[in-house]
Image (spheres, rainbow, N blue to C red):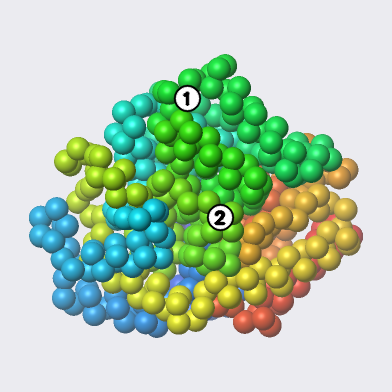
């Protein structure tokens, strides 16, 4: 029996089955864009721990910062004793992501916690309760974030869910565009939103609209620019908070620090996590100062958020990202992947759509070139083929039929192409 099989067997014995296995690989060490499995096999990583290691696995300056900080101050709770690192990180984030003239930042432990707090902040800032979210959205697994999440498979048996949550169709041009221009399609969805205020919930009751500029778990569907810009206008008109969830799309993934920077839209509140800490559990909510300060004392916060070791990891990560120009890397990786995926689409009819923004790239597998016949089975087989041939890759999409690339952006061109070759060979073997 291999070491990897032993690990997977022990996992079955001691860990609840419901904790997902997105890929059959194991891990014992990692560096750059390579994960070494429990049997010493080197795997190219296209999953990045679900989009967490844009700056690579174990970047040396981040490892050093974690070790040095752990020797000095691991935890005292920011509520109990203030420390400079929290402010350093808050200032850095406010500078990178200004939300108006004065921006404030609260640190969290995860993406779900960022979303949870963003909703509490929006409700307190507006004095309203309703939240609008989207089909295909993923915002986390805590109770409010799970309510906002769309895919029923993630929620089964967990209700009742939080009240005052309303859901709109996401403007998904591939599935529902019907040959319309992207702008016309965006206009149609904006009109539907205006109508929604008469048919579902009045705008005066809506605290926030939360949306991912590029849906992550939903399958890398990019919001049409005109739609996001239209949302901004509608939110301004009705005093609704626009919350942009950048947990998966942030920190260089799309070739910019924030995906929203592609759209020339600034949110009132934004949510972050994943790649901001290179794998340490840290996230944040960023917002206009007046909005962030509308919260009553102690309604936001917690024991661990902004833990000094996580702050040190995040500061070192951001500094390293600046040094290596993470956004240029995101753009470069994205261009290579897009070109290769488009070529694969010409070769394999099963690829119904290639889409994404920067290095947040994916393709969708369907039967008979029909967006409504998702081919999750081939997707699963392709992931298994890749795993046995040295590539870790994961799926996405409410139907589980989307192959997505979320790996480290520090990957060399040679390794990136080697990984893409494995995908292409897998498609060849599975589809002929
Ligand atoms: C857009 C988005 N929001 C929120 C989350 C939840 O983050 P976490 O898993 O850190 O709670 C995720 C996780 O994949 C995500 O992609």
Q: Residues within 10 Å of mark 1 (few under 14, many from 20)?
A: many
Residue, disc 2: 264
Quadrant of image for the C terminus: bottom right
Residue 74's place in the image compared with 179, above or below, is: below
Give the Cα separation between the discs numbered 2 and 1: 24 Å
Q: What numbered label is drawn on residue 203?
A: 1
In the image, taking residue 293 as reference, residue 185 lies left or right, namely: right
Where residue 277 sits, quadrant-wise, is bottom left
In the image, taking residue 223 as reference, residue 8 lies left or right, namely: left
Residue nearest the observer in this picture, 284 or 96: 96
Residue 413's place in the image compared with 207, above or below, is: below
Residue nearest the observer in this picture, 12 or 184: 184
Residue nearest the observer in this picture, 404 or 321: 321
Q: Earlier in the sequence, mark 2 or mark 1?
A: 1
* Label 2 SS: loop
**x then y, percent, for residue 390:** 65, 72
């Amino acid at each position: 029996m291999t070491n990897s099989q032993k690990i997977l067997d022990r996992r079955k014995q001691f860990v609840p089955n419901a904790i997902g296995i997105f890929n059959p690989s194991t891990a014992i060490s990692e560096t750059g864009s390579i994960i070494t499995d429990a049997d010493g096999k080197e795997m190219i990583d296209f999953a990045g721990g679900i989009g967490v290691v844009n700056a690579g696995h174990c970047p040396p300056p981040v490892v050093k910062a974690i070790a040095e900080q752990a020797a000095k101050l691991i935890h005292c709770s920011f509520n109990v004793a203030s420390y400079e690192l929290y402010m350093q990180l808050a200032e850095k984030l406010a500078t990178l992501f200004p939300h108006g003239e004065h921006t404030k930042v609260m640190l969290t432990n995860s993406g779900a916690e960022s979303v949870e707090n963003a909703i509490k902040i929006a409700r307190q800032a507006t004095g309203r309760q309703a939240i609008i979210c989207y089909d295909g959205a993923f915002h986390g697994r805590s109770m409010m974030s799970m309510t906002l999440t769309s895919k029923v498979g993630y929620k089964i048996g967990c209700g009742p869910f939080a009240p005052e949550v309303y859901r709109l169709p996401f403007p998904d041009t591939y599935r529902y565009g019907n040959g319309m221009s992207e702008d016309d399609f965006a206009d149609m969805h904006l009109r539907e939103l205006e109508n929604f205020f008469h048919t579902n919930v009045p705008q005066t009751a809506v605290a926030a609209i939360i949306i991912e500029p590029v849906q992550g778990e939903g399958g890398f569907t990019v919001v049409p620019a005109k739609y996001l810009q239209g949302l901004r206008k509608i939110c301004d008109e009705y005093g609704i908070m626009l919350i942009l969830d950048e947990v998966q799309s942030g920190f260089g993934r799309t070739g910019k620090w924030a995906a929203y920077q592609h759209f020339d839209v600034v949110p009132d509140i934004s949510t972050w996590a994943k790649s901001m800490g290179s794998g340490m559990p840290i996230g944040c909510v960023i917002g206009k100062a007046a909005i962030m300060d509308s919260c009553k004392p102690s309604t936001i916060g917690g024991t661990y958020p902004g833990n000094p070791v996580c702050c040190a990891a995040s500061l070192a990560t951001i500094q390293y990202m600046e040094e290596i120009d993470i956004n240029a890397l995101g753009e470069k990786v994205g261009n290579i992947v897009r070109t290769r995926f488009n070529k694969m689409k010409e070769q394999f009819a099963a690829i119904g759509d290639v889409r994404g923004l920067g290095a947040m790239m994916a393709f969708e597998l369907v039967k008979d070139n029909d967006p409504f016949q998702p081919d999750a089975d081939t997707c699963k087989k392709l992931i298994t083929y890749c795993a046995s041939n040295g590539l870790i890759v994961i799926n996405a999409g409410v139907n589980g039929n989307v192959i997505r690339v979320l790996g480290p952006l520090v990957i060399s061109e040679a390794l990136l192409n080697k990984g893409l070759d494995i995908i292409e060979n897998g498609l060849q073997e599975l589809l002929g």
